[in-house]
Image: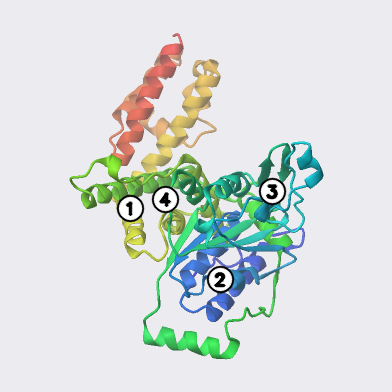
Amino acid sequence: MFANAHSGTLPTIEGFSLEHNALRLKQAAEFVGRRVINREEVIEQAIYAFLTGEHLLLQSRTGSGKSLLAEQLFAIFEDARIFRVQASKEQQPDTYFGGLDIELLKTGKIFHNTEGSLVESEFGFIDEIFDANDFTLRALLSLLNERKLIRGVQNVQSHIHSVIAATNYLRISEVTEAILDRFLFKAIILPDKDPLVQFKIALQYSHHSGRVITPPQKISYKDLRRLQQMITGVDTTLDFRISAETLYFANLVIRHYEYTRNRSLREKNKGQSTADYNDFYISPRTQAKALDLLRAVSFMRGSTLAEKEDVEQLYLMFATVGLPEEIQQFKKSYSAVYKSLNAGNGFEQIRMLIAYENLLEHIEEDHTILQQPLQQILSTTHLRMTLLEWLKEKVAGIDQTVHHNKRALESLIRELVPVCDEVREMKLALEKETTRIFQMIGN
């Protein structure tokens, strides 16, 4: 289910053992997997949703165990309030936010009594979410995204950590598309027709009759909350790191996946106008959230540093679990970009170009840097050895004026021979950036 851990790499902070908590989450996921058969990948998704404080949408036909799965997942934790609701078209926002204060309503003010509502719950389960009317769904948007109840004069911070929603179908409208965007993790649960799987499901049912089983050990919600805040950078006690090259690589994979998904859509809808179907779009917000998932993946692997191999697990966010074609497409994008960069010294070139870009930023902030000898300029950058070796070959003996320093840096970026298209794009962008910044600086 999860990648193998690196033994002993997660620290203990003030008595709070990250390694122990990662192990407890894995054991909890295995417990749920034994109770809800053949759902390991969705359970893994849910654990990552909890670790990043995101929401999970489950789609399937009736009777596939969506409710049992959600309830069994929530049963992992103790000291967390759970809000449950069956959505319907007749419901109004007060079903989710709490009843209206009648006295204030008489004065024209909308104010909800939030006690016991979704607003004051850590977890929520919304069954048949698309049976809710658009007015109610629109009211839920800020609660799911900003974790705030904003209604009339009322602006209340919510306790919501993660919501699991279930649906038998997708209803497409402007509002439901916005709701779907709030659920970063999505899964389709297909009926199990394998005889062995059906036997195991029947065996579980004969033992427990569809009831939620309390795990032998629960995880404190307080511990989950602290892990989530560390992983998302709210708690800076520990730094879960993503190197610049891994970050750049992840963005390349995501872009490649978005492009190939849209190419597949064009082929599937050949002859139709693009107005007749929705293209596949990854918003900047979703792409930024992927960094939280990368840190969560490294945590479950037993490390505080995200590796390039962790990027492959981003399919859990960008593909729909349960749809093999989407998962395979993401993994093909990962493999294609990885092979392209790894075939030569692409990753090394990216490291160098990132260091060069960082140097340009410093120069733009402080033009006097170029008045210093290049050895001094580069002494604190990753470019130091690369540039100094290059300078010895190409421009040895030049004087250390601003003009010659600019010329040396321009020559370095210009004469770099990219090993692949991904590096070439970055090089061309930095050449333009170099020209822009150096034109602002006199000799």
Number of residues whose C-alpha sits closer than 10 Å to that of mark 1, classed few (under 14), some (14–19) or many (20 or more): many
Element class at badge 4: loop
Looking at this view, is 408 or 112 the one in front? 112
Among the two numbered marks 3 and 1 on one chain, the one whose residue lies closer to the N terminus: 3
Among the two numbered marks 3 and 4 on one chain, the one whose residue lies closer to the N terminus: 4
In the displayed structure, 125 sits above or below 180; it is below
Among the two numbered marks 2 and 1 on one chain, the one whose residue lies closer to the N terminus: 2
Q: Which residue is mark 1?
A: 333
Mark closer to the observer (1, 4): 4
Among the two numbered marks 4 and 2 on one chain, the one whose residue lies closer to the N terminus: 2
Among the two numbered marks 3 and 2 on one chain, the one whose residue lies closer to the N terminus: 2
Query: Colour scheme of this structure image?
Result: rainbow
Q: Quadrant of residue 111?
A: top right
Q: Which residue is mark 4?
A: 172
In the displayed structure, 52 sits above or below 428; it is below
Task: For marks 3 and 2, give the CA distance.
Answer: 32 Å
